[in-house]
Amino acid sequence: MKYPGIILLLFIVFMQGCYYDNKDILNPGTGCDTTIVTYSASVNPVLTAYCVGCHSGANAPLGVNLETYPNVKLQTGKLFGSVNHSPGFIPMPKNENKLSDCNIAKIRKWVAAGAPNN
Ligand code: HEC
């Protein structure tokens, strides 16, 4: 064989293609990965991006401060209901679009796990 290295390389590239195809089938369309959900990597970035603009400091609305874990933990009972727009909860983020299904799924999973500080 004249170019075994090239053939091997093409084979590896081809196999990579198969790997990504399979991953797409496992997570159809959304690209939403909720396999591992933590406060620091999953929940805090969402709250920082969509909530902390209003929910911070001494004058946070209804005393709901979402800046730090201990304060967020206090709101565990309302967090999912508000972002999911469940009946009986004030829908959040206030006057803005509902969070993505992926971000809501992450919050639901984290709350269901007991809102751990991880
Ligand atoms: C534009 C400002 C604003 C943003 C952004 C916002 N909130 Fe609020 N939030 C409020 C206000 C004001 C209230 C007080 C109730 C009211 O006036 O509707 C409130 C109330 C709440 C409450 C208490 C609800 C209750 O039933 O007691 C929770 C929980 C809450 N927000 C969570 C969130 C979360 C989670 C986000 C981000 C996804 C968020 N908020 C984004 C302004 C905001």
Image (cartoon, helix red, strand yellow):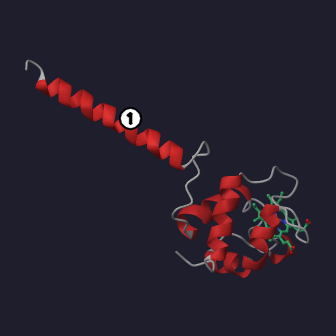
As drawn, which residue projects farthest toward the top? 2
Question: What's the residue at 66%, 54% (across, down)?
Answer: 102
As drawn, which residue projects farthest toward the left? 1
Q: Quadrant of residue 39?
A: bottom right
Give the x, y percent position of residue 50: 72, 56
The residue indicated by pointer 1 is 17
Looking at the image, residue 61 lies above or below residue 10? below
Horizontal relation, residue 9 to residue 113: left or right: left
85 or 16, nearer to the observer? 16
Going by the numbered disc 1, the residue's amino acid type is: Gly
Residue 76 visible in the shown view: yes
Give the x, y percent position of residue 74: 72, 81
Question: What's the residue at 74%, 73% (across, down)?
Answer: 65
Horizontal relation, residue 11 to residue 89: left or right: left
Question: What's the residue at 80%, 69% (across, down)?
Answer: 81
Give the x, y percent position of residue 36: 51, 64
Image quadrant in which the N terminus is located: top left
Looking at the image, residue 54 lies above or below residue 96? below
- Figure quadrant, ligand 1: bottom right
Residue 48 visible in the shown view: no
Looking at the image, residue 102 lies above or below residue 78? above
Question: What's the residue at 58%, 79% (across, down)?
Answer: 116
Label 1 crowd (10 A; few <14 / some 14-19 / many >=20): few
Horizontal relation, residue 79 to residue 115: left or right: right
Horizontal relation, residue 21 to residue 75: left or right: left
